[in-house]
Image (cartoon, rainbow, N blue to C red):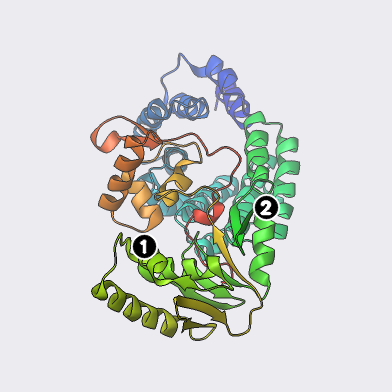
């Protein structure tokens, strides 16, 4: 490898893409194309970066397996940055195996971290944690240690383990300062802000207040009966009842919890649960049926009792009933939670991350676009959606993943 290629590689490792381009911009050999592609990715021109890396991989040929594998890893990183969750990421396993077989330990570890980041994005936290556990971060250079720690922090945040997240972010900050890469320092600082910004609203006895993630963690560890409107569950301690697939029951449970310890009139429950603007005998009969289902569903932690004017929620052991609501009420909050990371997403990637059909995501995006809350660019398969982050709030509780007790 000649001196210009070596100098360009060092510039990229130091977070100086312009310095790298100054050395190889006029060259068209395979190593130069690969370095130009990585530089363009760091500068944000992802389409040009993918094209250059694809050309580099072809020119390296089959005899240069390590170089081709490095190109695959670089393309996978670009795919993650552009939220192409079903694209180049699939080839990471083979590239990682090639790098490990040829002793390229650092790039193999980077491939594992990219796989873990992909798993984190789609909510597979256990698999992401297992993948990270195969790497010893102490043996990595500072920039790689920072990325590794950031992914660990992301997993801890999704699990609502704020102490572990804070520790991982501290390690990431130390490594990023040692690496002296401004973009990496900015990413660590942005992640650290998630611990300081409101994550949810607590509604209890007619009052509301904002909670940070550590407050939510404390709430879940308490003996309170929590109606979680961020993840559509009812929980007390380690007892968790999911109502994500039963929206009527969840709406009724939330209405009862917001009024606790008082009861809720039947007309109010019909409006909250069914959207009924007027009531007749059929509506009241349906309400009785749904209340019977809710009573059976919550029997381990609470009773649902009839009163002269409606129904009341009576916890069996908890001394407090609260509702944990989204920081900002929005019908399609889960879609906005992903778009709030500032990256552009395709509808197929959002569907994969949310675990729903692509058509459902497209309907949500169309509704949000009509309301002026999201924007799109491109057409067909190249169409991407984005929105600026919701100022002052973290959307961590709206992202998919295991429940906090898992």
Residue at 52 percent across and 76 percent down: it is 240
What x and y, as percent, mark residue 395?
A: 54, 49
Label 2 – label 1 distance at C-alpha: 55 Å
In the rendered image, which quarter contains the C terminus?
Answer: bottom right
**In which image quadrant can residue 177 be found?**
top right
| Camera sees residue 196 | yes
Q: Is residue 162 left or right of residue 397?
A: right
Which one is in front in this view, the residue at disc 2 or the one at disc 1?
Answer: 1
Q: Residues within 10 Å of mark 1 (few under 14, many from 20)?
A: some
Residue at 37 percent across and 45 percent down: it is 88
Viewer-side residue, 373 vs 43: 373
Secondary structure, mark 1, is: helix
Q: Residues within 10 Å of mark 2 (few under 14, many from 20)?
A: some
* Residue of label 1: 271
Ranked by sequence position, the earlier of labels 2 and 1 is: 2
Count of labels in the image: 2
Secondary structure, mark 2, is: helix
Q: Is residue 139 left or right of residue 404?
A: right
- Disc sitting over residue 384 in the figure: none
In the rendered image, which quarter contains the N terminus?
Answer: top right
Viewer-side residue, 46 vs 269: 269
| Camera sees residue 61 | no
* Residue of label 2: 137
What x and y, as percent, mark residue 211?
A: 65, 54
What x and y, as percent, mark residue 373?
A: 41, 36
What x and y, as percent, mark residue 114?
A: 51, 48
Residue at 33 percent across and 60 percent down: it is 275
Q: Is residue 4 left or right of residue 142?
A: left
- Residue 374 in the image: above or below residue 16: below
């Amino acid at each position: 490898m000649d001196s210009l290629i070596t100098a360009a590689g060092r510039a990229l490792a130091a977070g100086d893409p312009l310095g790298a381009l100054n050395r190889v911009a006029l060259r068209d050999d395979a190593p130069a194309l690969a370095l130009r592609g990585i530089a363009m990715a760091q500068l944000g021109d992802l389409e040009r970066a993918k094209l250059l890396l694809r050309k580099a991989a072809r020119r390296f040929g089959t005899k240069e397996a390590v170089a081709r594998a490095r190109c695959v890893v670089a393309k996978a990183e670009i795919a993650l940055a552009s939220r192409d969750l079903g694209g180049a990421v699939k080839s990471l396993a083979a590239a990682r195996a090639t790098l490990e077989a040829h002793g390229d330990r650092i790039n193999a570890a980077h491939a594992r971290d990219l796989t873990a980041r992909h798993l984190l994005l789609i909510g597979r936290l256990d698999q992401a944690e297992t993948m990270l556990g195969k790497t010893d971060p102490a043996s990595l250079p500072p920039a790689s240690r920072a990325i590794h720690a950031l992914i660990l922090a992301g997993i801890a945040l999704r699990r609502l383990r704020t102490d572990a997240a804070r520790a991982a972010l501290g390690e990431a900050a130390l490594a990023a300062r040692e690496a002296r890469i401004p973009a990496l320092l900015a990413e660590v600082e942005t992640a650290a802000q998630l611990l300081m910004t409101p994550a949810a609203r607590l509604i209890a006895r007619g009052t509301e207040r904002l909670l940070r993630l550590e407050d939510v963690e404390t709430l879940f560890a308490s003996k309170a009966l929590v109606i979680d409107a961020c993840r559509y569950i009812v929980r007390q301690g380690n007892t968790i009842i999911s109502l994500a697939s039963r929206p009527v029951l969840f709406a009724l449970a939330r209405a009862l919890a917001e009024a606790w310890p008082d009861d809720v009139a039947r007309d109010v429950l019909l409006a909250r649960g069914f959207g009924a603007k007027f009531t007749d005998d059929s509506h009241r009969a349906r309400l009785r049926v749904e209340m019977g289902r809710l009573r059976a569903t919550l029997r381990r932690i609470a009773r649902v009792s009839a009163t002269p004017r409606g129904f009341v929620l009576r916890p069996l052991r908890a001394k407090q009933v609260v509702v944990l609501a989204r920081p900002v009420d929005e019908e399609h909050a889960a879609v906005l939670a992903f778009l709030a990371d500032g990256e552009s997403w395709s509808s197929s990637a959002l569907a994969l991350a949310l675990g729903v059909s692509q058509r459902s995501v497209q309907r949500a995006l169309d509704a949000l676009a009509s309301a002026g809350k999201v924007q799109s660019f491109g057409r067909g398969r190249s169409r991407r959606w984005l929105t600026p982050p919701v100022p002052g709030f973290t959307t961590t509780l709206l992202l998919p993943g295991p429940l906090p007790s898992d």
